[in-house]
Image (cartoon, rainbow, N blue to C red):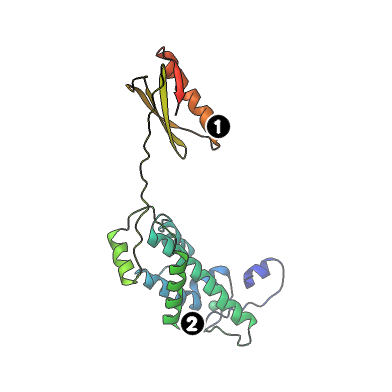
Amino acid sequence: MVDTLIQSKGFHLASKCRCCTLPSSESADHLFISSDLAISIWSWLRNLFKCRNRLYNLQDLLKFWIDKSSSASQVGVMKLLAFNIGLWEIWRIRCSATYGAEQSITLPHQKFFIFNSLRIINLRTTSFAPHEEASDSYLVLLSDLNIMLKPPKIHRPSFISWCPAPNGVTVNLARSRNKATVIIRNSKGGFILAKLLSLVVNSSLHFLSSTINAVISPVHSSDLILSQIQ
Ligand SMILES: [Zn+2]
């Protein structure tokens, strides 16, 4: 708990941060954003992602590390991990200065910190498959960091097979998450109707009953007989 939070609970406490050369009152904003410790850690991590602008407040910090980091992209996930590493390192160093023997911060060596952060990011993204292509600037960044580009996950189309019914019509059904496609064919395989359905149900049983309800009305309105659903 930072000092200003302890004070807000009614405890009398003379606050003196341990995260700066010239100590000031310790608040969460000070510790994580404007302290000497935070300035060093964030600037090292920002440099890693080629951001040259200093981030002066919480809003800027969250905008760069969270809002602009898509969890569908490789670099986006790397930035989210880097942000967590930054927060953790600031808190870890602050606690070891507060409760440890030295009573002052010891910054890690910059090269060691960057090496270790990249190692963690690499380990944590080993099995990650992005859902979007990397932009040109991200390709350059990954190459500069010597991190292998991960190819985006490909959504392969599914194919619907058709087996004829002796009479009446057949409904072929394919589902992907909450979307379903139905194709209605006659007994000779002739196309009658195709429909895309958006379903708000999660269970397979509800999905099936919703789909049957959705196809029964067009079948009946065309004076057809539904023989089977595949
Ligand atoms: Zn400080």
Q: Type of residue at label 2?
A: Pro
Secondary structure of the residue carrying tag 2 is loop
Q: Type of residue at label 1?
A: His
Marks 2 and 1, the one that precedes in the sequence: 2
The relative height of residue 217 versus residue 125 in the rendered view (above or below) is above
175 left or right, relative to 24? left
Q: Quadrant of residue 194?
A: top left
Q: Which residue is mark 2?
A: 108
Q: Quadrant of residue 225?
A: top left
Asked if one can make out residue 60 in the rendered structure from this viewpoint, the answer is no
Q: Which corner quadrant holds the C terminus?
A: top left
Q: Position of residue 71 (x, y in %)?
A: 43, 56
Residue at position x 47%, y 65% from top?
Answer: 124
Front-lying residue, 160 or 121: 160
Circle 2 or circle 1, nearest the eye: 1
Q: Position of residue 32 (x, y in %)?
A: 52, 70
131 left or right, relative to 202? left
Q: Which residue occupies the extreme front position in the image?
A: 166
Q: Position of residue 135 (x, y in %)?
A: 30, 58
| Dot label at residue 131 | none
Front-lying residue, 109 or 133: 133
Secondary structure of the residue carrying tag 1 is helix
Q: Which residue is mark 1?
A: 206
Front-lying residue, 146 or 65: 146
Residue at position x 31%, y 71% from top?
Answer: 144
Front-lying residue, 214 or 94: 214
Q: Quadrant of residue 156?
A: top left
